Image (spheres, rainbow, N blue to C red):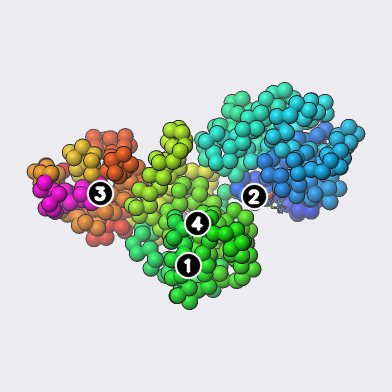
Amino acid sequence: MPDHLSGADTLLKDIFGFDGFRPGQQEVVQAVAQGQNVLAIMPTGGGKSLCFQLPALMRQGVTVVISPLIALMRDQVRALREAGVEAGALTSGNTQEETDAVWLALEEERLKLLYIAPERLAAGSSMAMLHRINVSLIAVDEAHCVSQWGHDFRPDYLRIGELRRALDVPLAAFTATADAETQVEIVQRLFDGAAPQTFLRGFDRPNIHLAFAAKDSPRRQILDFAAARKGQSGIVYCGTRAKTESLAQALQEAGHSACHYHGGMEADARRAAETRFQQEDGLIVVATVAFGMGVDKPDIRWVAHADLPKSIEAYYQEVGRAGRDGAPAETLTLFGPDDIRLRRSQIDEGLAPPERRVADHARLNALLGLAEALKCRRETLLRYFGETQVTCGNCDLCDTPPEVFDGTQPVRMALSAILRTEEWFGAGHLIDIVTGNETDKIRQRGHDSLPTYGVGRAYDKRQWQAIFRQMMGHDLIRPDPERHGALRMTDAALPILRGEVEISLRMDTIRNAPRRPAVKT
Ligand code: ADP
Ligand code: ZN
């Protein structure tokens, strides 16, 4: 290690009071201290702030920290000052006195870290000041705020690239958002497209058991899951507000201590639920995604999804609320065709621009791929986030590897039924066609004379439902909101239809399915 970096361990202990680095921190600290451009992706709570605070102390001059969260900035400044570090913040929350003190410390060249809110970058006076002082590093917290398709977009973040160019100093960007698209946008907007050194570490939470199950009788499945964990604190995430209330009641009736939580509740009631959850042992909160942002309870022992989350990122974040203390924690995510339909239509009917919708479908697809995974969930999940070295043994598929079978033939039957009816029908009617179920609708439309009629009798209705669900999971078919949810084929299905590739399906959800259906397409 070069001389000027040898102080890192001492500073870590003396200033921050830590005995060692967390996974990933040391490499990032080194790269930032050496003055490289860095993009570091670490999960929430992974210890990102140390990765710029420590290098700030190792470098000459001032480190400018840009963060959108005023309360968080003030917290960090307070903690740094208590540790004897000269730090200050320029935010709209400042008193005049505080601002004067920061300016004075800057004039006297005492300040090591200057926290600044992004909207300050719009003010000419702040820019002039930043040019006058000796800035040696720009650190950008919550760097995903620069992404225009993200939920946290801050227009002022677009000025950061300009600032970096003008000051010509290294920039270190930090975020917990790991999807590839956001990374590309960060690199474009903050680094003018010149690839920074990128670190992605610490996303694995090995103590959390990952499991998915096909939605069968959801209420029963959740009640059983909770019953096996009676007395432990847990969260059940639901897709609708109404469901949080009914499921919380069902849990209470089953003898659990449970309450509901959603964004439609009065602020007081929400706060009361949060406080109860924080303080009580063994409370179950049945909630929409509104619950969790401010929740910092280390001993949540389980998280269940009564409905499929909206993306793989949301899934990771929600299950990640379990087991923060490092002790074993369990999760269960239920999913069914209705969930997939709902999530797709939410994306299609949302107000997001088309490019964003494509990205949202991709994020949902990644989650469905995880739900229908044929091997290790953790590997599939972390591969999505870019982590390649994964050991697991702590997911349902490692516990019991699923039996798979060659599903090419039934999938082609389904696709053929979809195409021959010109992509105008939903799964129910399509299943009637392939199983040769002569309903009124079949007769009226003359679908009993289709070549696909009755070719799939080797599977019953339930098994076909599982096949259609897995096809949605593999994004071979999608409901079209403009056709009342009629299933349409995606481009991904073409190679299967043409016989260029085969597809494996999971056997467990297609109980009793024959290995080789004795029919032809
Ligand atoms: P992030 O910004 O990544 O969400 P923080 O920087 O706020 O996370 O750090 C999360 C917590 O971890 C803080 O309480 C911090 O003090 C603690 N922490 C950070 N690095 C270490 C370390 N090397 N050893 C022990 N605790 C650490
Ligand atoms: Zn596994």
Does the beta carbon of the residue at mark 2 sit less than 8 Å from ligand 1? yes
Which quadrant does the C terminus fall into? Answer: top left
Name the residue carrying label 1: 248
Q: Tell me the crowding category of disc 4: few under 14, some 14 to 19, or many 20 or more residues within 10 angstroms, Cα based.
A: many
**In terms of sequence position, does the residue under pointer 3 or pointer 2 come before the other?**
2
Residue displayed at 79% across by 50% down: 79
Name the residue carrying label 2: 46
Residue 434 in the magenta stretch? The answer is: yes
Residue displayed at 62% across by 49% down: 44
Magenta segment, prevailing SS (helix, strand or loop): helix
Which quadrant does the N terminus fall into? Answer: top right
Residue contact at pointers 1 and 3, CB within 8 angstroms: no
Residue displayed at 34% across by 53% down: 338
Q: Label 1 vs label 4: CA separation?
A: 12 Å
Name the residue carrying label 3: 427
Name of the residue lying farthest toward the right: 108
Q: Label 3 vs label 2: CA separation?
A: 44 Å
| Mark 3 element type | helix
Does the beta carbon of the residue at mark 3 sit less than 8 Å from ligand 2? no
Q: Label 2 vs label 4: CA separation?
A: 25 Å
Give above or below for 233 relative to 137. Answer: below
Task: Say left or right for 98 vs 337.
Answer: right
Q: Label 3 vs label 4: CA separation?
A: 28 Å
**In terms of sequence position, does the residue under pointer 2 or pointer 4 come before the other?**
2
Name the residue carrying label 4: 288
The range drawn in magenta is 426-444
Q: Amino acid at mark 3?
A: Ala
